[in-house]
Image: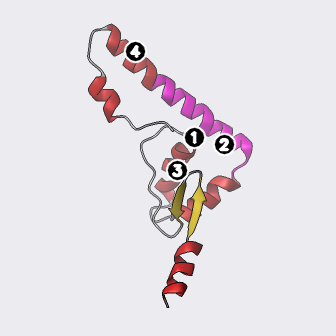
Amino acid sequence: MNEVYEKVRLDATIKNGRNAINTQAEYRPNKSFTARNLCGIEWKKSHKKGTAGEFATYWTSLLEEQKDLYEDRSKQAKGAKSSASASLRVTGIDTTPLLAATPSES
């Protein structure tokens, strides 16, 4: 019986880069500015109970042109965050707490 549980658990998990994703769990985008995450934030608005597997299927089904739009948005968002931090440093405001609170962009 334990072997059956393990098979089901493994079937419900996919590899995404270096992390395993439970495809049956509700999809929860984070606060990073990656193209995939920005797409996920929009997708989540119309798929309130959508799963990670459903979003993974959606993301992989997008055309390269559609993904490029999210890449452009990602670059704009990262640039805006970067310039905001730089302007605060020029004015002498310590941005260390702000930078520590922002998500990593890996």
Gap in angstroms between the C-alphas marked 3 and 2: 12 Å
Is residue 72 inside the magenta stretch? yes
Of labels 3 and 2, earlier in sequence is: 3
Which mark, residue 40? 3
Q: Secondary structure at mark 3?
A: helix
Q: Residues within 10 Å of mark 2 (few under 14, many from 20)?
A: some
The secondary structure type at the circle numbered 2 is helix
Residue 6 included in the magenta stretch of the image: no
The residue under label 2 is 67
Indicate the amino acid at tag 4. Answer: Ala
Q: Mark 3 or mark 1: name the one nearer the start of the chain.
A: 1
Tell me the distance, in whole angstroms, between the alpha carbons under discs 4 and 3.
28 Å
Label 1 to label 2: alpha-carbon separation: 7 Å
The residue at the point 51 percent across, 38 percent down is: 106
Q: CA distance from mark 4 to mark 1?
A: 23 Å
Amino acid type, label 2: Lys
Q: What residue did someone put label 4 on?
A: 86
- Magenta span: 62-80
- The span from disc 4 to disc 2 (Cα, nearest Å) is 29 Å
Left/right of residue 106 with respect to residue 58 in the rendered view: left
